[in-house]
Image (cartoon, helix red, strand yellow):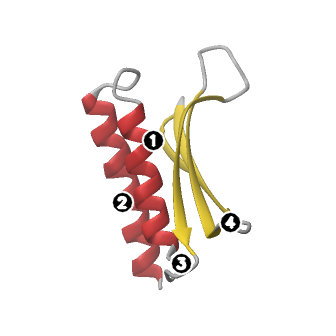
Amino acid sequence: MFYVTPRLRFRFAHTPGGKRWKKVTLCHIENKPINENDWFPIVMGIACCSKEDSFSRETGRKLSLTRALKKSKMLINKDTRTKIWETYFSKVNDLKKRG
């Protein structure tokens, strides 16, 4: 789970791809309105890994996030989209440093 602000987050899910795909990565960007307890979906991006390709969680996350942000251009302003990428790379780099 990646928190951009207390009311904006994004998360990833890696699922089996079924007969057609090896794996599918989903990116959900969600919003929590003021005075609400529940998170609501804004947009979702999908990346599918072919059965001939090697599955990479990192590649799936980047592709699905890119596709979610392309869909969200009318809903999420450029500064917030930039902050989403900064949050993603900051957390990924922290995880890589820990080993």
Q: Which residue is mark 3?
A: 55
Q: Which quadrant holds residue 50?
A: bottom right
Badge 3: residue crowd in 10 Å (few <14, some 14–19, many ≥20): some
Question: Mark 3 to mark 4: distance in Å?
Answer: 11 Å
Q: Residue at x 47, y 53 (%)?
A: 64
Q: Is residue 82 left or right of residue 40?
A: left
Taking 58 as reference, is 28 above or below it? above
Compare marks 3 and 4 and give the one earlier in the sequence: 4
Q: Residue at x 32, y 41 (%)?
A: 83
Which residue corresponds to mark 1? 68
Spatial separation of the CA atoms under disc 3 and disc 1: 20 Å
Mark closer to the observer (3, 4): 4
Q: Position of residue 82 (x, y in %)?
A: 28, 41
Q: Quadrant of residue 36?
A: top right
> Can you tell which quarter of the image residue 15 is in?
bottom right
Q: Is residue 29 above or below residue 34?
A: below
Q: Secondary structure at mark 2?
A: helix
